[in-house]
Amino acid sequence: MPKTAPLHLHLESARKRNPLFHLTEERWAAAAKRHRALARRLTVTIGWDGDILDTALRTADLMINSNPPQVRLRERAPRLKWIQTTGAGIDPLMPLDWLPADITLTNNSGAHGAKAGDSCAMALLMLNAQLPRMLGHQREHAWQPLYTTPIAGKTAVIIGFGDLGLAAGRAAKKLGLKVIAVTRSGKAGRPADQAYPVSRLDQVLPKADFVVVTTPLTSQTRGLLDRVRLEKLKPGAGIVNIGRAPIIDYTALRSLLEKGALSGAVLDVFEPEPPPPDSPLWNTPGLVVMPHISCDDPRYVDSLFDFWFENFGRYVGGRRLRNIVDRGLGY
Amino acid sequence: MPKTAPLHLHLESARKRNPLFHLTEERWAAAAKRHRALARRLTVTIGWDGDILDTALRTADLMINSNPPQVRLRERAPRLKWIQTTGAGIDPLMPLDWLPADITLTNNSGAHGAKAGDSCAMALLMLNAQLPRMLGHQREHAWQPLYTTPIAGKTAVIIGFGDLGLAAGRAAKKLGLKVIAVTRSGKAGRPADQAYPVSRLDQVLPKADFVVVTTPLTSQTRGLLDRVRLEKLKPGAGIVNIGRAPIIDYTALRSLLEKGALSGAVLDVFEPEPPPPDSPLWNTPGLVVMPHISCDDPRYVDSLFDFWFENFGRYVGGRRLRNIVDRGLGY
């Protein structure tokens, strides 16, 4: 590679986040070994809770950060060109009016597929088996067999068909389900059997044995599954949410679960998160609380660094980066 | 078909069993419609809790019964040639010294595959995700994320590779697991990647990320997974039992779960069944109590009748019946 002045990459983490997501010196060193040639083109600083942030920003060209600084960013970081977020959903950063037009923002969409597929398969099988209800019986030491037919041939409606939706769709197909994707455009490739635009959601919901929510949170998806829409579901349908909590009206969902109108709900996302200890969600019948782990592999940061290095190769080669966030769509 | 005197088939059910397993007039009528020509060769009686049993036995040639009469059977049923049981496991009927040598006993092995596959996939994914532990956290309203790697590439040791073991193996392969079968002979076909004889179980157990018990209960399998063997498992391994309870030492299993030595156990079978309300199994940490539903489809009797008619076709054609129980092996 040509000899050029090294670029300054700043890695910033919050200690209060789960250590799984910490951009540590050890993890960076291991990744730098895996991508030796590219790593040589970098000077790297590692900050925690903003301890060296302002100093680092003065010279940083590149940054990896779950929660980039939004106040007077251009002024504080005159050379910054590219921010990589550690997560896939950037809803906490919206609207992007704080982001100078010449700074590229990329997200970590794509890191979640394998684990998300496993989690969706598990949730679909649990809902089909009425396991959430049986877990309630177990708590009461009550033996109440609930017999259910195999899952093959039933229908999963998957809302959103990006990285997570595709993973959910593949998992559902492997189980023999029919997959209906609901997308903005009304189009979806394999493994969807059918696709509908979100404007026709009301007609699609009554077909679902299972609904899997995988969309990012945007102004279009907030409140998408409100009470009226949830009431369009078949009796005994089941719900999975690995997207974001505000997409579903959880109060309405709880009342349907309490009435026994649904087979259950497996929820991985909450608002606020975690739910407070006195939240009724913890012991709503048929509700399984997953502590936001459904799409995360413990090798998360290693994969993030590998993805970043691959993208950095594109950057130094003058090619278009992958995972650039669309400022209008918010993902 | 040749015109011959009709054969007398007696169907016998116990009302205390789950209605799912009742051999009702409606279900028989529906099955007889599906197999009209063969049904014409039968005279059928339907008994409940022995109400007409002795009268029926006097002329019965054939019987379908979950719990055949074992006392003085030949004397009471001089013409009886063939008994079909409604279940797959015949351990409650062993030893078969009550069964006259000229009466054939067939079981319902094979009816359980599709549902058993779903149940095993669900249990494996739950154990891999550490869901049993997270369910315990949910009960305590505690948010404690446990991150786990995807299931693909891990190893399932499947004990027994008959109908249920095959279903478990296929489900595991679909999830990308390596499948090791443990069988009497040490041989197993697809989808097993490897097979070992039960005599080498001690060497196989330390390889397992998951152990799935699917064997019938026989004098060879009773107590197979005792304390010493359970302690050979890797830390964090998970256990599924869809076979019979006495194959595993549940007391030893409980103490391993209490110590956190295993990721969890999904148990579908108990002894006694159901476990009494004060059994410690109900709230052992990491233990999921499934109320013996993992292999049963609510269309159970319909499938049983279809299987029986197919076998009856063989019977009248003078061909060898399927699912004949080996008197020595007990399955």
Image (cartoon, coloured by chain):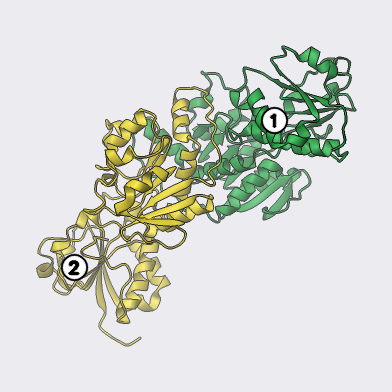
Chain colours: A green, B yellow
User: In percent of the image, x 56 and y 41: which residue is there?
Assistant: B150
Which dot marks residue A180? none
- Tell me where residue B48 sits by quadrant: bottom left
- Tell me where residue B46 sits by quadrant: bottom left
Instruction: Examine the rendered structure and indicate whether residue A230 appears above or below residue A69.
Output: below
Image coords of residue A18 (percent x, y): 59, 23
Q: Nearer the viewer, residue A315 or A203?
A: A315
Q: Is residue B195 visible?
A: yes
Q: Nearer the viewer, residue A110 or A204?
A: A110
User: In percent of the image, x 40 and y 73: which residue is there?
Assistant: B35
Tell me, yes or no, whether dots 1 and 2 are on the same chain.
no
| Quadrant holding the N terminus of chain A | top right
Q: Secondary structure at mark 2?
A: helix
Q: Secondary structure at mark 1?
A: loop
Is the residue marked by circle 2 packed among few (<14), some (14-19), or many (20+) residues within 10 Å? many
Residue under pointer 2: B56
Instruction: Examine the rendered structure and indicate whether residue B201 appears above or below residue A56.
Output: below
Q: Residue furthest bottom?
A: B2
Are circles 1 and 2 on residues that touch, CB within 8 Å?
no
Q: Chain of mark 2?
A: B
Specify the amino acid type for callout 2: Ala
Q: Chain of mark 1?
A: A
| Quadrant holding the C terminus of chain A | top right
Compared across the picture, whether A216 is left or right of A57 comes to left
Q: Nearer the viewer, residue B331 or B283?
A: B331
Specify the amino acid type for callout 1: Gly
Image coords of residue A28 (percent x, y): 68, 28
Residue under pointer 1: A87
Compared across the picture, whether A213 is left or right of B236 comes to right
